[in-house]
Every structure is written in C-alpha cells, then in structure tokens.
Amino acid sequence: MPKIKRLALSRQSLIRSIRQFFADNQFIEVSTPILSPFLIPESYLDFFQTKLATPEGRRRSVYLTPSPELWHKRLLAQGIGSIFEISHRFRNGDIGKLHRPEFWLLEWYSLSAGLQTSMRLTQDLIKYVVARQTIYYQGQKIDLTGEFESLSMFEAFEKYTGVTEDSFFDKGVLYKKARQLGLTVQKSDSWDDLYTLIYVSEVEPYLGEGKPTFIYNFPTQFAPLAKTNLKDPRFKDRFELFIAGVELADGYVELTDPEEQKQAFLTEIAAFKKQKKPLPKVDWQFIEVLEQGLPESSGVALGIDRLLMIILDKSDIKEVQLI
C-alpha cells in the first residue's frame, strides 16, 4: 500500500474514533467560522490578519481564528449543551517539529465539569482512540493502563528542579535556580520570565515519561480565561497533558465572572502594548456573553496532528500531514 494512503487511512481512523467517543458521551458536534472580525486578546499568540472585501467596495480587517472558543461560548450561553469541534485553526509564527501555522484542532466543552472531571474525560479519550495498553514513542515505552500521572505545578517544580512550594513565588530563588541550571537570565528578568524559562526548559521536556502526565494549577497570569482556584487564588484551574515531553492538550474550568474576565482582557491588552505587538480588534461581545450567563463548564483543546504523531511514532508534525 502506498505510504500516503496508509497515512490518510490512519488520519481517517483517528477522526472516526474521536467522533464515536464524543457521540457515546452525548456531545453535539458543531462547526463554527474560521474567519472572525475580532479575537480574544491573548498576548502570547501571533495572529493572521487579512482584508475582507465587502459588496460596497470597502475592506475591513478579519482574522483567522486560533481557536473556536469565542464561538463555542456563545453557543454554550444559548443552551446548546456539551459540544465538540474538529477544525483547522491558525497561529502565526509557529513553525517547527511540533508546530505548524495551520493545524488540526479538537476542542470540546463539558457542562458542569470541574478540573478533575475534565482531566478524566481527556484520559478516557486518549485511551479510547489509541486503543492499546502500551505504545512506543521515539524509543520511550508509554504505559496507558490505569490512571495517568497527575502533578500540581508545585509538585512538578519540586520534582524536576528542586524548587519547593515555599519558594516557588520567590523571584530571587528562581533566578538563582536558573543560573544553577545553566539558563541565560538577567537580573532584570521578571518572575514571569524566570518561571516560563524554567518551566519550558526544565519541566516540560520530562513530563509524560513512561506514562501520560497531567500538570495542573497554573499561575493566575498564565490562564486569563480560566476560573481562579478556590483553595489558592494564586493559581487558575488549568491543566496540560503530556506524553514523552509532547504537550497534547490544554484545558481549564471556564471563567464565568464577566468583571474578572474584563480585567483579564485589560491585562492582556496592556501586555500587547508592552511587547509592542499589534493588537487585534478585541471581542468585547465575549464579556456580554458572560453577562448573559455562561453555564459552568470546562474546555479542552487537543492537537490532533500531535496525537497522530504519538500514535504513529513520528518526530515531526509534517510526517503526519498529507500535504
């Protein structure tokens, strides 16, 4: 069988399994626009902007959406129930073995689901679509039986860097630890800068070794659309799932407080200006959706291309794309 046909059949089989899983769990599949006249402000993302020609001869800016989230929450507010979508989405500047500017995204929203429930559904999905007890990825044996590993951010930092809970928010401690780890840092670096550098360099690459790993509870400023953790307001109810150092999914309990969301938007807008990045037209209607009443829910975004990489044991995302 030609290599391209085997790949196409693998992609088809994966999508069929995903759809069956969500059908079995009473989710509704939806399809939402890729083009939007506005975006949710997320300063860590670069976006694609183009011009839409109107029948009157005018041209107005529209954007290729990086996620269907702005549409999904409108549907949730109208009472659609638990939903999922498989679509192509876009992020500018993301090119590498794990990134492409255009990517295949699975995103879903579960009504009345807290963080642990959302993590369990994500675990069940992975087990269902992989349909094997053990897989091998880039020489690593990955055990999919039983419960996936679950680490809080505190636990992960202590396990992989030695930074304890008591000193996690101490900028001086993170600066010293970064120097010890051989990372390039400056005295002027903020706590956010140091945390991000250490997390990306010394924690992420080791998550999911031998068994898929959830890491949960992210610092507040790194989850502007997530609900604040009730036990510790320094954190948001957000998680990521890793297998063999590859991030597969990002999920969180949805923020429903419109005033808190507005302040998060303003913080992100200030970050755009500080970084001297172009600011897209902001989706202020998103705040109105929350004011109307967004039901309690959790959302998860999963990279389908990356999941297929894991299943087929490929090291580069281009190896699992047909074109």
Image (cartoon, grey):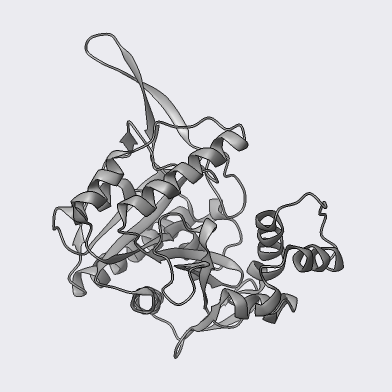
Left or right, 235 with respect to 36, comes to: right
Seen from the viewer's position, the closer of residues 273 and 92 is 273
Q: Position of residue 252 (x, y in %)?
A: 40, 65
Residue in the image at 34% along x and 19% along y? 60
Left or right, 62 with respect to 166, comes to: left
Q: Position of residue 217 (x, y in %)?
A: 50, 71
Against 93, residue 245 (above or below) is below
Residue in the image at 75% along x and 51% along y? 189
Visible in this render: residue 17?
A: yes
Seen from the viewer's position, the closer of residues 283 and 215 is 283
Residue in the image at 29% along x and 73% along y? 113
Q: Which image quadrant is residue 62 in? A: top left
Q: Which residue reaches farthest top?
A: 57
Visible in this render: residue 42?
A: no
Q: Which image quadrant is residue 126 in? A: bottom left
Q: Which residue reaches farthest left?
A: 79
Seen from the viewer's position, the closer of residues 283 and 89 is 283
Q: How many marks?
A: 0
Against 17, residue 4 (above or below) is above
Left or right, 109 with respect to 90, comes to: left
Q: Position of residue 120 (x, y in %)?
A: 37, 79
Q: Which image quadrant is residue 196 in? A: bottom right
The quadrant of the picture occupied by the N terminus is: bottom left
Q: Position of residue 12 (x, y in %)?
A: 33, 60
